[in-house]
Structures are given as C-alpha cells and as structure tokens.
Amino acid sequence: MAIELAKEKWSGVINQVKIGAAKAISVGQEQALPFLHEEGGAPHKPVVAYEVWDTVPADWPEALISAYGNVLKDPVAWVKKCVTEFGAQLVAIKLISAHPDMGNKSVEEIAALVEKIKKAAGVPLIISGCGDNAKDNLILPACAEALKGENCLIGSVTQDNYKTITAACLADGHSIIAESPIDINIAKQLNILISDMGMPAERIVINPTVGALGYGLEYAYSIMERARLAALSGDKMLSMPFICFVGQETWRTKEARATEEELAGWGPALERGIVWEALTSAAFLQAGADILVMRHPKAIDIVKKNIEELMRG
Amino acid sequence: MALSGLDIYKLLPKTNCRECGFPTCLAFAMQLAKKAVPLDKCPYLSKEAKLVLEESSLAPIRLVVIGKDKKIELGNETVLFRHEDKFYHPAAIGFIIDDNSSDKEIDVKISKINRLKFERVGQALEANLAAIRQTSDKKRFLDVVKKVSAATQLELVLISSDLQAQKEALGLIGARKPLLHPQSAQNIADFAKLALEYKTSLVVASPSLEEISNLTKDLKKQGLEDLVLDTASKSLAKKIWDLTQIRRLALKKKDRSFGYPTLVIVGEKDPYLQVVEAADYIAKYASIVLLEGAEPWQALSLLTLRQNIYSDPQKPLQIEPKLYPIGQADEKSPVLVTTNFSLSYYTVLGEVEASKTPSYIMSVNTEGMSVLTAWAAEKFTPEKIASSLEEFGVKDKVGHKRIIIPGYVAVMSGDLEEKSGWQVVVGPKEASGIPSFLKNLK
C-alpha cells in the first residue's frame, strides 16, 4: 500500500524583492518551507552579499584581515576584489565612517563615495548606515539620491526611526530593510508602518536581528520560522524575505576570534572562525533566510555550495 | 491521537466502584487523560478497552535508548517546530571510523574523538557516538571493533551489511549494546534476530519511505521496536524532505510505522561542507548524525548548534544571581553589572577573562532576561541593582564604591547613583568592548 505523504498546502507566498538594475538579483517567492521542493516552488535561491566597510575595520581578527589584505584600506578596491576575484554578485556596504565617533564623514563625502563604489562594483548594492539614527537620517537619503535608479536595498530602519529613510527610498526607487529586535510583532508592525507610507510590500525585506551560533542563534531562528509559517498561511505583512547580517555577529564571538593558545583544544582559529560563520548561515538558511551578509570569502564559498546542494532538489 | 477524559470514560466500566482510589470512573478517566495514574489501577477494564487505551497512551515517536553506560535517549519528540514546545532529545553526534584505515590512523582518531568535550555557557558539550564502518574483510572489521571498543567509553554503532561480521562483533561487544546499522533492508529479519538476542537497537535502512513503513510494521510484530530509521544516501534536499516527512507522518498523521528516531550518515567529504551538511540535519529533525571529520572545530560548531536548537524556548537559561569573582579578584577589582540571563553573563565572562583583568561580575536577578529586555520589562532597574549590591554584600568585597553598567542602560546612571550611593561608570554597549574598556579604566 502506497503511503500518503504529509504535504502542506499553503495559501501564502513570500514576496519577490528585486535588488539592482543591470545585473538585478531577485529573492523571495517561496511557496513552501525552506528546500521542501516537493511541496512548493522556490524560483530564486538564497543569495550571499559580501560585507564591505568604508573604513579600515579596527577590530577584525587575523582570519579576515589576511583574506582581504591591502584592499581593506580602500572601499573601492575592496568592492572590486569581491566582485572580480571572489565573484560577488551582491555587495553590502557599511557606512561606518559617517558615525560621529568613527570619523564623522560629511553627507557629501559619503554620497560621493557610494557613487564611486557603484561604478566600481557593477553588481547590486545593499547600503547600511552607520548605526547613529540622526546621522543615518542624513546620509541614507543622500545615498538614495546618489544611487537613484540603482534599485538598492537600503537600511536598516527601525520602529523608532523609519520615516525619513522610507520616504527617501520611496522617492528614489530603492527597497528597504526593516529591522526588528528578535520580535515577530514588531517586525509585522514595522512592515505595516512602512507600507502605510506608500512603500509597496515587494520593496521591504525583514532584518530579524540574528545572533551568532552559540550566542542566541535560536531566538532569531524561531522568530523566522514563526514568521515564515505565518506568511505561508497568508499573513501579507510578514511575507517579506529575510536578510541576516551573519558576518558582523559571528566575527565578534570568542569562538571565531580567539587564538588556539587562548582556547586550548578548540582547534586552529582560522578553521574555527570560518566554520562559525558558515554554520551560522547554514542554520538561518534552514529557517528561511533569503539574503546572508557575510565576511570571510571561504565561508561564503562554503555557504554558496550548501545553497547549490539544497536547491538542486 | 491522545484521547480526552470523556473518550476514556466511555471505555471504562462506569460502575464507580472506587477501587482505583477515585470517587468516580469519570474522575479516574480525567486523571488517565493527564497520564497522572497508571491504567492498571482499574481491575475491571475489558481487554478491548485496555488495548485501545494502551495504544493511545504511546508516544507518537518512540523513545529509543542507545548503548549501555551513557544510555543516549533519542526520539519521543512532540513537535515540528521548537517554538511550539521544544525539542526534547538532542541529536546524537557521532564520528565514523573506517576499518580500512591503518591502526595508527585509528588510534589517532579515537584519541581525538575521546577528547571532544567542551564547556559553553556552563553546559558540558560532548560527542556521543563512535561508529565503526566495515569496508574491508570480516577479520579486519572485528579487529577494529575490538580496538575501538577498548579505547573509548562512547556508545558504539556498527555499520556493516555483513551478517556474520555483525554477529561475531556482537559476540565480542554485545554487552555494550551497540546500534546495528546493516545499511540496507537485506537480511533484515536475521539482523532483527540478532538485535533481539542482544537486546540492542537496529537501523532500518531503505531509500523508500514505503518500504521503511512496511519493515517497521513487520519488525514490531516480531517484537523488535527499538528501531532507528535511515533513508540511505540521497541528495541533501531529498534527505531533508525524508526527515521532514518522517517527523510529520509520525506526528501529524499519527502513523506509528514512522514513529522512530532517525539516523543520517553525512556523505560530503570536504571538511567544511560535511560540517554544514551535518548542521542541516541537526536543524531538520535527525536524531543521530554520523560524520567522518572529528577535528575539534568541526565538533565544537556542531555541538553548539545542537545546544542552540535543542534549548528550551519557553525557559531562558539562567544562572544564579550573585557576585562572581573572576580571576584573582581583590578589593581593588572593578565590579561589572549584568543580568542573570546565562548568555549575557557568559558573554561578559568571556570578555572579562580575555581582558585578563581580575574583576567581579554582579549578576542581577532579571528572571533570565537579557539586558535590554529586562530593562524594558523593568526587571533591570536602579532599585533592583541597588538592592542586589546590598544583598550580595559587595561593599565588603571591594574597597571602592564604583560599578560598571552596560552601555545600553546608560540612561539609568543618575538614578542608580542616587538610589545606591555608588558611583556609576557606563561601560561599552557590546561585551566585545569590555577588554579595551577595562584596559583604559583608571
């Protein structure tokens, strides 16, 4: 007797979000839980974005510094290396140098820089602010204007600070990253607030604020599973793809940073760091991640191969 | 399907004889539904009713115990997603030793596997299984079984489709109750006899879910229920589909023929990719994951993922709220304040240790909430911190009156100074800033 499989019939589908102009990348449109291909289609595979800073990272561990070398001093060269040498199809720029404590670069300087980066990259861009709300409300609209027509993904906006940046993205045709603090209700609320300003749902991506492996990974993991289940059950205000900033979380952890002498018996620092970033990403892929922002080229390679396997069916 | 109290009541004699210790049959039925009393308290139950009730009280996924000493419990899961309740029995992680490796290689690998013990956030993380896989002749397999079993306390898996080899291996180490993995459904009846004879568990391996279902039904009739399911070597996405189907069929369709723990052998050879493949299986329902790579960084990352996925989402890990001396803390040492959410505490601890500055960490009882959550929920307030300083007698431990609070709660500084009488220094927002902060602290 043939067994009757336990297949789910979902009424909802994840929104498609398109990033970029010429070499645009689309994410989303999943009709089922991650990688259950027999249950529903997933026309777009999850993507990895290379994280690039506009300033020399002061506290990156040796594993990362040696992977990039000299280009860390020059964001344009850094982006070029990601694209030409590592084959990046998506780059995530972090505009640290605008932060009042990290260089306090002017709005004009930042806008000029992102234009230069755009020309050098030739691939779709994700633009992240410096983390200071007041300053981000100045620089991100300027970046939006400078990158008009590039259909970037810009953010992150939060429940307390979304209006200025949303308006700018709306005006200049960009999509937006909506960040919520590991909280499904705030995620939904923020999506509603942004939508109420006229932003189409197909231009919103959820940043659920992930934690690294061993540092609260399971909280965002379950929030993502719950949100994805709600979306597939028809909740339109949670039907956005997820972006997970994995690199910045993993490379802060003791496991990714400490030398072998400091952590006797835990193995060489390089392998430990790479596997920590790759495994954190792998876990979030299983929870529904659509965009992973990562740092180490080797970890990115591993995760891309994992995605190929998972999408192969 | 779990029966309700009323469903159960219909099956009882309804005589209210009170011999079960309850005033009425209905009261007894209600207790049965809660699984608070055993069925045999009722002496007058009909055979048919007993059968129905026994069947309904069975867990949808059987609890299977592997081995003799460590007794690894697997299965008995109740949900598909951890937020619905929790995952109960952490996936067993095991490492494969091929018998075609040289004796020297095997010695090195066993000692590596034996050392895979780590401590994170106050919990011990350990590898669970050593799996011996036959690729050579019977004699070599038996030699390696002898060698490995003598060298490790871990529970064992014997991977071999050679019935005679398995039989002789059990003759050697049957008392350890190794899990038998015959790799296919061939000779399954003979393997079942072996498992029954040695009272150990058996892997039912077949690429077809349908065949697995038929086999487990047959084996159950033979009296063998300590089974583990393996859908053989397939692509990663197909394995995830199989694991999901087995879990769903058992829980949602109440199909007992799938109500067993599962086992996956990682096929990938690349040292990184095999860890990632194993991670996918840990996230998606595998009860046992076996892989070749046994380097500490490989094991540590997988054991940590398992710790995360199998933690109880309804109950944040907490530590005892108190004043913890770190290193050779003395009366001059700084006092850092954090919550009693274990992740907050251990993150701060890690950084303080890295700073090599002897310090005190005062863990305030925030009912296991993290800094920002506790602050928002008013569990991490100036009053609470002030009373903790009193309660833990901090003024008797240090000669100064200065505390360091997390940067995220800088707003409470003034209020806290007023309420506690201690000078408040605002520390970094992220624990990662602690070493440089402590270095610059005058």
Image (cartoon, coloured by chain):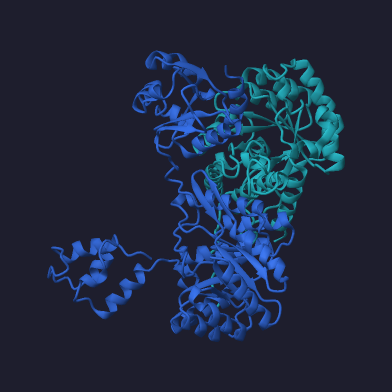
Location of residue A89 by image quarter: top right
Report whether B364 appears left or right of B354: left
Image point (67%, 83%), residue name: B139
Q: Residue B23: horizontal and vertical position, in percent?
A: 13, 63
Report whether A156 appears left or right of B91: right
Report whether B221 appears left or right of B134: left
Q: Nearer the viewer, residue A260 or B242?
A: A260
Location of residue B421 by image quarter: top left
B185, above or below B22, in the image: below
Location of residue B117 by image quarter: bottom right
Q: Nearer the viewer, residue A199 or B142?
A: B142
Chain that the image shows in blue: B
Q: Is residue B151 visible in the rendered structure shown here?
A: yes
Report whether B2 appears left or right of B316: left
B109, above or below B299, in the image: below
Image point (40%, 13%), residue name: B418
Image point (86%, 30%), residue name: A119
Q: Residue A125: horizontal and vertical position, in percent?
A: 76, 34
B442, above or below A249, in the image: above
Q: Is residue A50 visible in the rendered structure shown here?
A: no
Q: Residue A247: horizontal and vertical position, in percent?
A: 68, 39
Image point (41%, 25%), residue name: B397
If the image is split into quadrants, where does the N terminus of chain B sit?
bottom left
B274, above or below B198, in the image: above
Q: Residue A59: horizontal and vertical position, in percent?
A: 70, 30
Q: How many marks?
A: 0
If the image is split into quadrants, where does the C terminus of chain B sit?
top right
Q: Colour of chain A?
A: cyan
